[in-house]
């Protein structure tokens, strides 16, 4: 349920209304727009008579929200959310960062890759220190040392870092290290314990869509994070599993405008994991840009044939630089 308040509603009356709602055992989410203020009611709304609420002087109208996701819902928050990722980098509301770097942090080559992607126009650095792998015998990442290397690159280049968190027990470590954005990977997209734990922080979360997850399930996963108090959520379309086998996954580009219609949260697209082959990544990056993505996440490696993981989908620095040039042309064309 949402209550749209009158434009001239005095603040003391608004505070009184919020207190009355809280006494009914509900939470409130207040969104201040240019022309109206929206109060979202979260909880058992059967405790409140909508007709009584609408009869109050400062209330313009009351509207039911049928979708199960509330805090992530655009009806609760009509304006696009802008997430501050640190070091002057923002996403959403017209900001368009590109996140680039290797799948796995491997060592000293990280700083070389970071310098190259920054020179090409990337604004954020990605790299996995903890890696979920299908096989238990595959490389699992460098762990805490990988986080340290990411932080060293960030401090040298002034680029916020994005890295995957897999275990709720590591949240404190990520926060202590000052990781700018915690990524929830596709395999943990519905790890509700992890979602709630990152929700207890204020660190931005890049939430990837699960391999077989519907759009509503993705938004409900975001709701888990937001329900704990962390509104700094970035959604990520990274492809879903279908019957098609010619690509790693099927890039669900229509999810981008659908998510923008349903939610105020920024939407990033990851063409690398979606298609799984270097030769298709640039075209899909351009398509996602044209579809209205708020940013991109692209894998880049200086020697893909020797990458610890996902070398088959990584761009070289030269390929990435050319792709960035074309991305800027697309953005200029659709502006």
Image: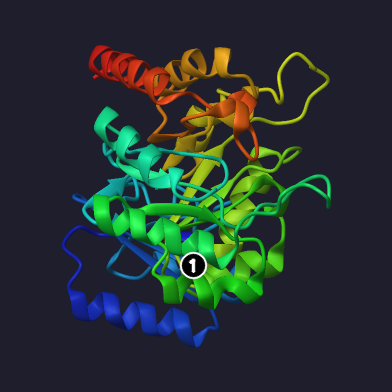
25 left or right of 134 in image: left
**5 or 209: nearer the eye?**
209
> Of helix, strand and loop, which one carries label 1?
strand
Q: Residue at x 60, y 72 (%)?
A: 170
Q: Position of residue 124 (x, y in %)?
A: 35, 45
> Splitting the image into 4 quarters, where does residue 247 fall?
top right
Q: Position of residue 53 (x, y in %)?
A: 43, 69
Q: Residue at x 51, y 54 (%)?
A: 163
Rendered view: 229 above or below 72: below
Q: Which residue is mark 1?
A: 41
> Splitting the image into 4 quarters, where does residue 318 fall?
top left
Q: Residue at x 32, y 33 (%)?
A: 116
> Splitting the image into 4 quarters, where does residue 198 fall?
bottom right
Q: Is the C terminus in the top left, top right, bottom left or bottom right quadrant?
A: top left
Q: Is residue 231 at least partly visible in the picture?
A: no
Q: Is residue 299 at least partly visible in the picture?
A: yes
Rendered view: 221 above or below 18: above
Q: Position of residue 156 (x, y in %)?
A: 26, 55
Q: Residue furthest bottom?
A: 23
Q: Position of residue 148 (x, y in %)?
A: 44, 64
Rendered view: 114 above or below 58: above
Report crowding for label 1: few under 14, some 14 to 19, many 20 or more residues within 10 A (C-alpha): many
**63 or 124: nearer the eye?**
124
291 left or right of 243 in image: left
131 left or right of 7 in image: right
Q: Residue at x 80, y 45 (%)?
A: 134
């Amino acid at each position: 349920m949402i209550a749209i308040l009158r434009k001239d509603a005095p603040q003391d009356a608004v505070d009184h209304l919020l207190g009355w709602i809280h006494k009914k055992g509900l939470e409130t989410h207040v969104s201040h727009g240019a022309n109206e203020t929206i109060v979202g009611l979260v909880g058992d709304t059967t405790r409140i008579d909508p007709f009584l609420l609408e009869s109050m002087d400062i209330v313009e109208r009351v509207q039911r929200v049928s979708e199960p996701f509330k805090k992530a819902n655009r009806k609760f928050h009509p304006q696009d959310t802008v997430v501050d990722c640190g070091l002057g980098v923002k996403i959403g509301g017209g900001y368009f960062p590109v996140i680039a770097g290797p799948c796995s942090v491997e060592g000293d080559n990280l700083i070389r890759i970071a310098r190259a992607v920054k020179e090409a126009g990337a604004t954020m650095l990605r790299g996995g220190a903890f890696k979920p792998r299908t096989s238990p015998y595959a490389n699992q990442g460098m762990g805490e040392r990988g986080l340290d290397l990411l932080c060293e690159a960030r401090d040298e280049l002034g680029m916020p870092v994005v890295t995957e968190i897999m275990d709720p027990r590591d949240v404190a470590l990520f926060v202590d290290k000052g990781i700018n954005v915690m990524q929830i990977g596709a395999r943990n997209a519905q790890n509700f314990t992890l979602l709630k734990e990152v929700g207890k922080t204020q660190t931005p979360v890049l939430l990837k869509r699960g391999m077989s997850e519907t759009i509503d399930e993705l938004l409900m996963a975001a709701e888990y994070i937001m329900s704990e108090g962390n509104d700094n959520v970035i959604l990520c379309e990274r492809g879903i599993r279908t019957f098609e086998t010619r690509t790693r996954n099927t890039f669900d580009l229509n999810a981008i405008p659908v998510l923008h219609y349903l939610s105020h949260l920024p939407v990033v697209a990851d063409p690398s994991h979606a298609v799984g082959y270097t030769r298709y990544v640039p075209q899909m990056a351009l398509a996602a840009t044209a579809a209205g993505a708020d940013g991109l996440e692209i894998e880049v490696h200086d020697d893909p044939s020797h990458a610890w993981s996902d070398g088959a989908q990584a761009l070289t620095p030269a390929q990435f630089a050319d792709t960035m040039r074309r991305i800027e042309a697309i953005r200029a064309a659709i502006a």
